[in-house]
Amino acid sequence: MHMQELQERNAKLVKLFQEKSPREWGKEAIVMELLAESGSVADAVMRLEKFKTIKGTTIETLKDEIADTLFILFRLCDKYNISLEEAYLQMYKKALKKVTEAKEV
C-alpha cells in the first residue's frame, strides 16, 4: 500500500471521528496533538531502553505510538493539502543528492 492510499484512508477515519465528535480540530490543535504523540513515542523508547522503570511497555506499545503519530501527521498534511508521500520523496531526492555529493556528512 502506498502512503497516499494510507493518507486517504486516514481522511476517511477522521470523518468518522468527526461524526462522533463534531468539534473541528484546527491546525493548532493538530500540531499540539502531534507534539503529544511524539512525546508518547519518546516515552515508549525510554521505557524500552530502561531509562524509565515503568513496566508494561513492549514493541507493540511503540508500534501503536508511532502509528498514532502518523495518524496525526496525516491530519496535519490534509489541513494544508500536502501529500506526505510527495513531500517525503522530494526530501529524499534532496537528501540523497546532498549526501552523495558531500565529502563528509
Image: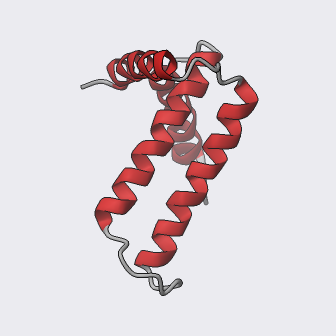
Nearest to the observer: residue 15 or residue 83? 15
Among the 4 quarters of the image, the one containing residue 59: bottom left
93 relative to 55, above or below: above
Q: Is residue 55 left or right of residue 105?
A: left
Q: Residue at x 63, y 42 (%)?
A: 33
Left or right: 2, with 76 as reference point: left
- Please tell me whether residue 39 is drawn above or below residue 94 in the rendered image: below
Point out the image quarter for the N terminus.
top left
Residue 96 location (% of width, % of height): 50, 40
Question: Residue 88 at x, y = what percent?
Answer: 50, 30
Q: Position of residue 68 (x, y in %)?
A: 45, 43
Q: Residue at x 54, y 34 (%)?
A: 73
Q: Residue at x 60, y 58 (%)?
A: 39
Task: Give the position of the C terminus as an image quadrant.
Answer: bottom right
| Residue 98, horizontal then vertical, whole percent | 59, 41
**In this view, 48 is above or below 73:** below
Q: Nearer the viewer, residue 88 or 24?
A: 24
